[in-house]
Amino acid sequence: MQIDYRRRWAGVRRALRDADADAFVAVGAGNTRWLASAESPPGSPPSSTLNYVFVPQRGAPIGITSSLEGHRCRKETGVRDLRLWSGYPDVGAEFASAKAALKALLEEREVGSVLSDAALRLQRGVAVERSTAVRDLRARKAPDEQERIRVAVRHADAGQRFARELCEAGAGLTEFEVAAEIDYFLRRRGVQETSFTTIVASGPNAAFSHHSPGRRRLRDGDSVICDFGAFWKGYCSDITRTYFVGGSPAPKWRKRYALVLEANERSRAALRHGAVAQDVDGAGRNFLGRSGVGNRFVHGTGHGFGLEVHEWPSLTYGQKTVLEKGMCVTVEPGLYFPRQGGIRIEDDVLVTRAGCETLTHAAKALY
Ligand SMILES: [Mn+2]
């Protein structure tokens, strides 16, 4: 399925009409990609090939990028009109900076008011209002996006099956080695890149939710948190599983694992169109609280994902956002025990009218 940019631009124009503004100027990398270059690999350099995407009330959107990126942009963007700039006079670009190109464009189009996702300072006579319109539009994934997310999830699922075998039989391997094997496995399947630096946290290191893999060697009985994802045609996945070296955890770890799994299930059961984010968080959190381990669940339940690994909305304590069908979010409760280890079980989920569809299929049943 082709990316339907026209549908996206139409959404932005509705927001412009509602606010009675002349144009939207997108600056954030996820937003410029959503408007113009969704399938570009998101990695560096730079995180977006476009400095600005200008969407006028009437007429076609325009992209502004460095002359270095012109080639990539022509190949990868859904925007026809590109304005190039270069800081090197000898290159002979029309503009000396991205900002200069933007200001010239606003003048050319006689723009008096813009909505933007950033605190832009523009020339006199151009009013700028901050807007979350693109962020909000991005949160609900259209079919062209869901299709790409499903493939990204499938790759990460396969990566988790691989990681499980590796960790269970992996006594003696370092976290670095496990992470490198996972990355290599994913890259060989043709994914553009991993969604973020792969997390492999073993033994006491698993007590920290975002440990960076190091030289520690896996030992029998360790819990090992493996948290990673894959980009596919611009869209990402984000999955966590927890394995036990040797494959048969001690009874206390089985018990803890069962609690996290149930918290995960309870939060997913609370997800549906119209649910409030804090209630989805609470469904798992309150269960862990009643089980006497609420103080070990030290982060939010989940977050949106799509073009970026962390997007709107967030499923955390006190968050009042109303969830809508089409949103893709993670559900990832965890328990962390200082000096001992930790457990996190993260699924990728699509919100539907009646409930939700769990996209991740990598095994997570009890040992
Ligand atoms: Mn996550």
Image (cartoon, grey):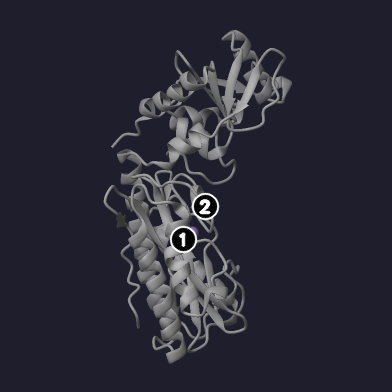
Q: Pointers 2 and 1 in contact (CB under 8 A)? A: yes
Q: Nearer the viewer, residue 361 or 39?
A: 361
In this rendering, does residue 189 appear at all? no
Return the x and y of residue 162 as percentages of the image width and height: 37, 71
Q: Tell me, yes or no, if residue 322 can be seen here.
A: yes
Left or right: where 275 falls relative to 298: left
Q: In the picture, which quadrant includes the N terminus?
A: top left
Specify few, some or many for label 2: CA neighbours under 10 Å numbering under 14, 14-19, or 20 or more.
Answer: some
Residue designated by label 1: 281
> Percent position (x, y) of residue 94?
64, 15
Q: Is residue 283 above or below residue 17?
A: below
Give the labeled residue for mark 2. 319
Q: Quadrant of residue 263?
A: bottom left
Closer to the chain start, of discs 2 and 1, is 1
Q: As rendered, which of 221 and 259 lies closer to the eye?
A: 259
Q: CA distance from mark 2 to mark 1?
A: 9 Å
For residue 163, which quarter of the picture? bottom left
Name the residue: 35% across, 73% down.
364
Amino acid at the residue labelled 2: Gln
| Res 139 → quadrant | top left
| Horizontal side, residue 271 vs residue 212: left or right | left
Q: Is residue 294 left or right of residue 249?
A: right
